[in-house]
């Protein structure tokens, strides 16, 4: 691979206390070059060039981009190619606070950029950038209760937001809230507290029955139409999706049967599946559904690369977050799904061939590049192709956010 080429772009949602996405932290992997956090000048140029080429707003769905910066990115003003109003520049607290760095941060703030002091710890205080930043980001593992109390005291009267990173469980989330954090980075929202002993509600079982009908080949219109129409909310969601600009239909659709005829069985099955999952996810953060869509599209795009069935892989990616949507263990849900045994076992975590793409994107979501590389190599997949499929899936989801949100 050519020197300086960006091998990967990963992202993590930044959520508020109400589980609403406020933006995305974007991470760039530079392959054999120095990582962004250390950053050579060439690496900095490469990152910004590729960021502009890819289109930052496409990765953040028009929301704020949180971008970790090297000293070069700041001092040499390479970040000027970004839109200040849509960008938060994360300055690692471990960077030597040289006069050029502090001066560059002051000028960037004056030009409209917001700044985060990332990797905060008390051994780095007092920090010269503290008066310039709007966010302070800390890893809970390195900031105890006493440290957070001191931080809140330090911030008293200041309009600085406390952001917790690596929040992976509901316990982490509750702890961060108790300590005064109001922004959270991590996948805690994908791990809600499951209702272990409760039965799947009858309404959900009805929706699972519809899913089973949807994935029969050929589709039985006499059965599926009345089943969908029995659920007013599902019917509304389905017709809203079919009529949305995302599907670019030339005429309005007003009935289930008309929707099937106009869009065709394959597209109808996908839209109906999405409508059902929207119902499943109604009480959970919308980001879960969007993650499921990105996974589904990624698995579909990568299927032929791995000699797998694209439609089946799409379903695998889509269904992989059902436990988070329904707060039920996968062990209870998998037997009810209209999938082959191999796909069910993949959902349950078996490391089989069918799970290779899902396993890769799960690791990539957490920016664990070593693990995703190992997964790709173990299944004979091309890492750079997988990265491009991920980028395409993110852009595809962003293009359809309005109709599915």
Image: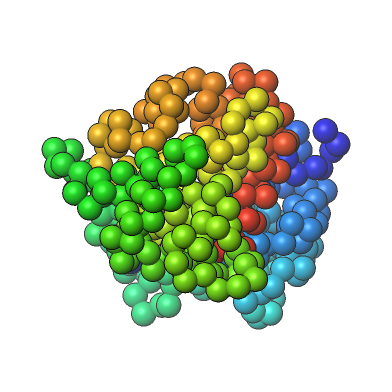
Taking the view exactly as shown, the residue that stands out farthest to the right is 2
Q: Position of residue 89 (x, y in %)?
A: 61, 64
Colour convention of the picture: rainbow
**Pick the front one: 371 or 308:** 308
In the displayed structure image, the side of residue 109 where residue 363 appears, left or right: left
In the displayed structure image, the side of residue 25 where residue 344 appears, left or right: left
* Vertical order, 261 against 322 (above or below): below
* Vertical order, 338 against 69 (above or below): above
Q: Give the total number of marks visible in the rendering.
A: 0
Res. 135 in view = no
Residue 211, picture quadrant: top left
* Vertical order, 102 against 304 (above or below): below
In the displayed structure image, the side of residue 36 where residue 77 appears, left or right: right
**Pick the front one: 383 or 210:** 210
Q: Position of residue 206 (x, y in %)?
A: 26, 49
Quarter of the image with the N terminus is: top right
Which residue is at 38% across, 43% downward? Answer: 213
Which residue is at 45% across, 40% downward? Answer: 215
Taking the view exactly as shown, the residue that stands out farthest to the left is 197
Res. 246 in view = yes
Q: Position of residue 13 (x, y in %)?
A: 49, 56
Which residue is at 52% across, 35% downward? Answer: 312
Which residue is at 37% across, 40% downward? Answer: 212
Residue 320, picture quadrant: top left
Q: Position of residue 85 (x, y in %)?
A: 62, 76
**Pick the front one: 85 or 328:** 328
């Amino acid at each position: 691979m050519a020197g300086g080429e960006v091998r990967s772009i990963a992202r993590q949602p930044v959520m508020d206390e109400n589980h609403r996405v406020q933006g995305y932290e974007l991470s760039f992997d530079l392959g054999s070059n120095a990582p962004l956090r250390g950053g050579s000048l060439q690496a900095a140029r490469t990152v910004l060039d590729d960021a502009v080429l890819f289109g930052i707003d496409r990765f953040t769905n028009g929301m704020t981009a949180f971008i970790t910066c090297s000293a070069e990115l700041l001092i040499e003003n390479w970040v000027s190619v970004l839109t200040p109003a849509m960008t938060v520049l994360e300055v690692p607290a471990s960077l030597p606070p040289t006069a050029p760095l502090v001066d560059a941060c002051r000028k960037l703030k004056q030009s409209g950029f917001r700044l985060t002091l990332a990797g905060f710890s008390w051994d780095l205080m007092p920090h010269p950038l503290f008066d310039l930043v709007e966010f302070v980001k800390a890893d809970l593992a390195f900031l105890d209760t006493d440290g957070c109390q001191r931080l809140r005291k330090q911030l008293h009267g200041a309009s600085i937001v406390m952001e917790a990173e690596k929040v992976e469980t509901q316990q982490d989330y509750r702890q961060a809230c108790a300590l005064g954090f109001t922004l959270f980075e991590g996948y805690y929202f994908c791990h809600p507290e499951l209702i272990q002993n409760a039965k799947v509600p009858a309404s959900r079982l009805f929706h699972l029955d519809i899913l089973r009908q949807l994935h029969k080949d050929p589709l039985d219109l006499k059965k599926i139409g009345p089943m969908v129409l029995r659920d007013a909310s599902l019917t509304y969601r389905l017709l809203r999706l079919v009529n949305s600009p995302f599907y670019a239909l030339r005429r309005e659709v007003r009935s289930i049967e008309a929707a099937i005829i106009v869009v065709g069985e394959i597209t109808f099955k996908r839209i109906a599946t999405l409508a059902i999952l929207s119902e499943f996810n109604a009480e959970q953060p919308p980001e879960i559904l969007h993650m499921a869509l990105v996974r589904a599209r990624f698995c579909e795009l990568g299927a032929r690369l791995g000699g797998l069935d694209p439609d089946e892989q799409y379903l695998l990616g889509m269904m992989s977050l059902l436990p988070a949507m329904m707060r039920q263990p996968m062990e209870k849900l998998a037997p009810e799904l209209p999938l082959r045994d191999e796909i069910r076992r993949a959902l349950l975590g078996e490391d089989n061939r069918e799970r290779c793409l899902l396993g890769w994107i799960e690791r990539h979501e957490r920016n664990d590049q070593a693990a995703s590389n190992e997964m790709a190599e173990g299944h004979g997949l091309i890492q750079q192709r997988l990265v491009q499929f991920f980028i395409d899936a993110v852009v595809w989801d962003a293009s359809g956010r309005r109709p599915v949100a």
